[in-house]
Image (cartoon, grey):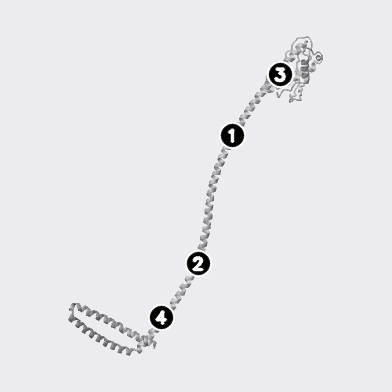
């Protein structure tokens, strides 16, 4: 239907006239057969060109040249060197056949009878309508196939896009899950790092404070040790000097009391002898009353104790004398 140029005005008029007066014969139109034949030739050329474009066989009724039919002795004019002009229609698309060299067309001779002409025209119109309907069906079939192919391609593309969207969603969910895991791990590690940084800062403060205290304490210890050493040295010197003074003083006193010491020694010796004699007498008395074995250790023990007591008393008296001399 896209290549059909449509009915011309003369064809429409002829159809109307045939519908109104089917039995009438158009006698006046035979006066200009050349123009009518020219329009038919142009129309046939356009249809032939259209059929060649779509690859359809051209019926014999629409061919440009026909075998000559010798029905009357009338001479038919031959149309030579005519250019084909497309038929314009306002309602349908314009068909512009290519302009080429001149085409020689042999026109059929007009029939003498009007009825034969009408029948031929009706047959031509009918064949033309059939051809147009066939072309229309072919175009519709082609359009259906194109629509089916297009819908199939669209369905395949939609399936592909759906599969791709599903894949993309799956990948996106997997990436989101990985991001969530990583984000949770990162959050935990960051919290731990912050806590470790806080503890590190506190420990460093304590360390700095302890180090400062250690340095201060070490300096204080060094000072105190130096002071202690100085004091101990001073004490030692004082004690040494005091002992030296004591020794010197004792030597002086010993020199002064050398005679008195000898007299005291003599008195002590006498007292010791008297005590020993007294102890011996008491021991003899005890031997008379008790066996000798039992009484011998009893006699010896007090002697030793008494000797120790006497020895302890002797230096004590000397020390008392020294203290008295020092005070004096």
CA distance separating discs 1 and 3: 45 Å
* Structural distance between the alpha carbons of marks 3 and 4: 158 Å
* Left or right of 128, for residue 192: left
Mark 1 and mark 3 in contact? Answer it, CB < 8 Å.
no
Image quarter hosting the C terminus? bottom left
Q: Which residue is depicted at the point 73% across and 20% down? A: 45
Q: Secondary structure at mark 1?
A: helix
Badge 2 local density, few (<14 within 10 Å), some, or many (20+)?
A: few
Q: Is residue 251 above or below residue 139?
A: below
Q: Quadrant of residue 121?
A: top right
Which residue bears the numbered disc 4? 240
Residue named by callout 1: 160
Name the residue nearer the viewer: 177 or 153: 177
Left or right position of 120 against 242 = right
Q: Are marks 3 and 4 in contact (CB under 8 Å)?
A: no
Q: Earlier in the sequence, mark 3 or mark 4?
A: 3
Mark nearest the camera among 3 and 4 is 3
User: Of marks 2 and 4, which one's residue comes earlier in the chain?
Assistant: 2
Locate the N terminus by quadrant.
top right
In the figure, is residue 88 to the left or right of 57? right
> Number of labelled discs?
4
Residue 16 at least partly seen: yes
Q: Is residue 103 visible?
A: no
Q: Which mark is residue 213?
A: 2
Where is residue 125? Give x, y as percent: 73, 17
In front: label 2 or label 4: 2
Q: CA distance from mark 3 to mark 2?
A: 120 Å
Q: Secondary structure at mark 4?
A: helix
Query: Which residue appears at 43% of the width and 77% of the height?
Result: 233
Q: Along the polypeptide, which appears first: circle 1 or circle 4?
A: 1
């Amino acid at each position: 239907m896209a290549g059909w140029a449509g009915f011309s005005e003369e064809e429409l008029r002829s159809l109307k006239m045939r519908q109104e007066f089917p039995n009438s014969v158009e006698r006046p139109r035979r006066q200009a057969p050349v123009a009518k034949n020219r329009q038919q030739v142009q129309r046939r050329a356009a249809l032939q060109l259209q059929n060649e474009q779509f690859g359809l066989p051209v019926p014999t009724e629409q061919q440009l040249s026909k075998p000559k039919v010798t029905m009357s002795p009338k001479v038919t004019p031959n149309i030579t060197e005519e250019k084909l002009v497309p038929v314009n229609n306002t309602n349908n698309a314009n068909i512009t056949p290519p302009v080429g060299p001149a085409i020689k067309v042999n026109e059929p001779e007009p029939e003498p009878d009007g009825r034969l002409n009408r029948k031929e025209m009706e047959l031509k119109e009918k064949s033309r309508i059939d051809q147009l309907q066939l072309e229309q069906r072919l175009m519709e079939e082609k359009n259906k196939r194109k629509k089916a192919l297009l819908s199939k391609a669209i369905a395949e593309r939609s399936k592909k896009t759906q599969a791709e969207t599903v894949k993309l969603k799956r990948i996106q969910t997997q990436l989101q899950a990985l991001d969530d895991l990583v984000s949770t791990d990162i959050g935990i590690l960051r919290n731990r790092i912050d806590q470790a940084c806080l503890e590190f800062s506190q420990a460093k403060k304590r360390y700095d404070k302890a180090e400062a205290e250690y340095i201060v304490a070490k300096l204080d210890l060094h000072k105190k040790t130096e002071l202690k050493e100085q004091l101990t040295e001073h004490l030692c010197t004082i004690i040494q000097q005091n002992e030296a003074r004591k020794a010197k003083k004792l030597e002086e006193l010993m020199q002064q009391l050398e005679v008195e010491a000898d007299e005291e020694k003599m008195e002590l010796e006498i007292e010791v002898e008297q005590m020993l004699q007294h102890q011996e007498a008491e021991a003899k008395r005890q031997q008379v009353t008790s066996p000798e074995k039992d009484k011998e250790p009893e006699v010896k023990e007090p002697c030793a104790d008494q000797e120790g007591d006497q020895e302890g008393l002797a230096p004590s008296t000397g020390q008392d004398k020294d203290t008295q001399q020092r005070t004096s």
